[in-house]
Amino acid sequence: MGRKEPYALLSFDIGGLEEVPETLTFEYSVLFDENPEHRGFLLVEHNWATGTFANEGELSLVFRPEVRRLDYDLTTSGRLRGFLALVRLGADHMVLGVDHVFFLLALLLPSVLRREGRGWQPFDSLRPAVWNVVVIVTAFAAAHAVALSLAALGVLRLPEALVETMIAASTTLAAAHILFPIFRGRLWWIVFGLSLFHGLGFAGGLRELGALNDHALLAVLGFNLGVELGQLLVVAIVFPVLFLIRRLTLYRKVLLPVAAVGMILVSGVWVIERAF
């Protein structure tokens, strides 16, 4: 989300109508067949009936490959519609953002295990594993909320190259923790610190979309809510599987270290690409 992506801004002036209709139907399908992650946005800048004037930041509709045709109600305010669109946008960017998902997976993979000596051993019960996940999820969520809020207020803004490099490096560190217990006793604080950069990356994307120009608070709340819902979806899918296979020697001795090395290699390439 934080990386700059090419986009086209097309303006349309619908004027000269004898009577303003109650709804307008829009259909958008540009690039969806070539790139399923592409999104189209509708921003209504001026609409007398809803009291919308000089709006350059509030999203009215979001088009996705599975939703290409949408109606826009001209008789009611689009503020709630824009808020819900940002919730969906935040969830999409969490679930579809490979670097964000890799970071979360690197944290979840050892969450069902405890470190003993140089190796990992399975938890005997569900409670300590759930507690590890609670720590990860709350640290992740708190960091996003702080970073997005500070960015929306203009208090915190770091160079994009630094933010994107640190997002990639966060996965490298989280995966290295699987091989070497570098987070031991400091899981919440380290996850929180690394997740701040993920939040700044999201904020940079929101700023580029112009979503922070108007109704910044609603934009931050909606997008952050979507990110956390996306995070919970990933956790809900991955954690039960990990808990079920935690006792397998194949998981602890083979799959876990192989996944760690793979993520270190991939994220290491990202670090080099983004830094240089």
Image: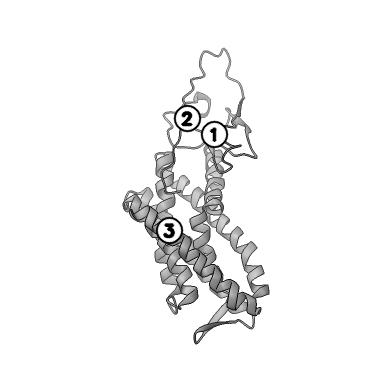
**Do the residues under discs 2 and 1 have CB atoms within 8 angstroms?**
yes
**Do the residues under discs 3 and 1 have CB atoms within 8 angstroms?**
no
Q: Identify the disc placed on residue 269.
A: 3
The percent position of residue 235, horizontal first and vertical second, equals: 59, 63
* Residue at the spot of label 2: 52
Does residue 248 appear anywhere in the picture? yes
Q: Residue at x 31, y 51 (%)?
A: 159
| Mark 2 neighbour class, 10 Å CA radius: few under 14, some 14 to 19, many 20 or more | some
Foreground disc of the pair 3, 1: 3
* Residue at the spot of label 1: 77
The answer to whether 127 is drawn above or below residue 196 in the figure is: below
Mark 2 → mark 1, Cα distance in angstroms: 8 Å
Foreground disc of the pair 2, 3: 3
Mark 2 → mark 3, Cα distance in angstroms: 46 Å
The percent position of residue 8, horizontal first and vertical second, equals: 46, 31
**Do the residues under discs 2 and 3 have CB atoms within 8 angstroms?**
no
Q: Residue at x 40, y 47 (%)?
A: 204
The answer to whether 29 is drawn above or below residue 232 in the figure is: above
The picture quadrant where one finds residue 19 is top right
Mark 3 → mark 1, Cα distance in angstroms: 46 Å
Nearer the N terminus, badge 2 or badge 3?
2
